[in-house]
Image (cartoon, rainbow, N blue to C red):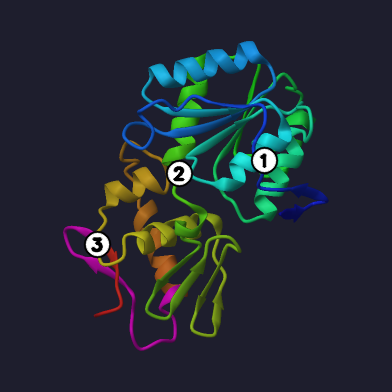
Amino acid sequence: MLVEAGLSVDNGPAWGVACFDGEIRGSVGMRVLLIEDDGETAGYVVDRLKAGGHGADHAAEGRDGLRLALAGGYDALVVDRMLPGFDGLVIVKALREAGLQTPVLFLTARGGIDDRVEGLDAGGDDYLTKPFAFSELMARLNALVRRPPLSQIKTTLRVADLEMDLLGRNVRRGAREIDLQPREFRLLEYLMRNADRVVTRTMLLEHVWEFHFDPKTKIVETHISRLRSKVDRGVERALIHTVRGSGYVIRASS
């Protein structure tokens, strides 16, 4: 029995649930749970998923959908907003409160800005309105499944005693807080993500300034100098190094 957000869901038989996974589940493609009360839409989506080599389970009612989703094992969930039993928002909120982070794509006729915001705030990862093209639905599912789990996403970068908080957007070296301008932050982030690897001037222009040409200025050198004065000021061991004729590198060793 699970009680979340005022919901009571037992583990008994999931009446009204049809399974369409065939023999391909676990061997090819992704496994998708579709929670959709419109039979025509559900049949179309399930048939197309199967034709593409994916496994699909279908729940036509909110309680059944929540029960299946909580059982886990799905790569993605496709959830309607307006459902009998529990509506889509309630389902996704309950899943997130239960700690289930399976990607959720809302598929619904409710396409207003407020509706989209509600869906994403409830814990949805993407939002597609009806009518829809299956090719777009598939592209969005593929994008969601490619995303790494939240637990694998780095939110902090470290090189020696230099620490960057990507969520808080702040930088510290030891106990000292370093005040950076937005471009300096992006430059340092790129260097730290490539720690111990030499990055060229061209790479910095493309990834930090999004220039795909040489502006023929000292913009990179100026920002590196400014960044070095903030990061390496007053310490014995410098972290930002110039590799003559090649570029720049941030590393703990001298």
Figure check: 99 above or below 230: above
The mark nearer the N terminus, 3 or 2, is 2
**Side of 118 where 23 appears, left or right:** left
Residue at 35% x, 46% y is 205
Residue at 39% x, 52% y is 219
Mark 3 lies on residue: 197
Q: Is residue 131 visible?
A: no
**Side of 87 where 160 appears, left or right:** left
Mark 1 lies on residue: 66
- The amino acid marked with disc number 3 is Arg
Tell whether position 6 is magenta. no
Residue at 66% x, 47% y is 11
- The amino acid marked with disc number 1 is Leu
Q: Secondary structure at mark 2?
A: loop
The C terminus - image quarter: bottom left
Q: Position of residue 148 (x, y in %)?
A: 44, 49
**Side of 70 where 207 appears, left or right:** left
Q: Nearer the viewer, mark 3 or mark 2?
A: 2
Q: Tell me whether the residue at label 3 lies in contact with that at label 2, contact meaning CB atoms closer than 8 angstroms.
A: no
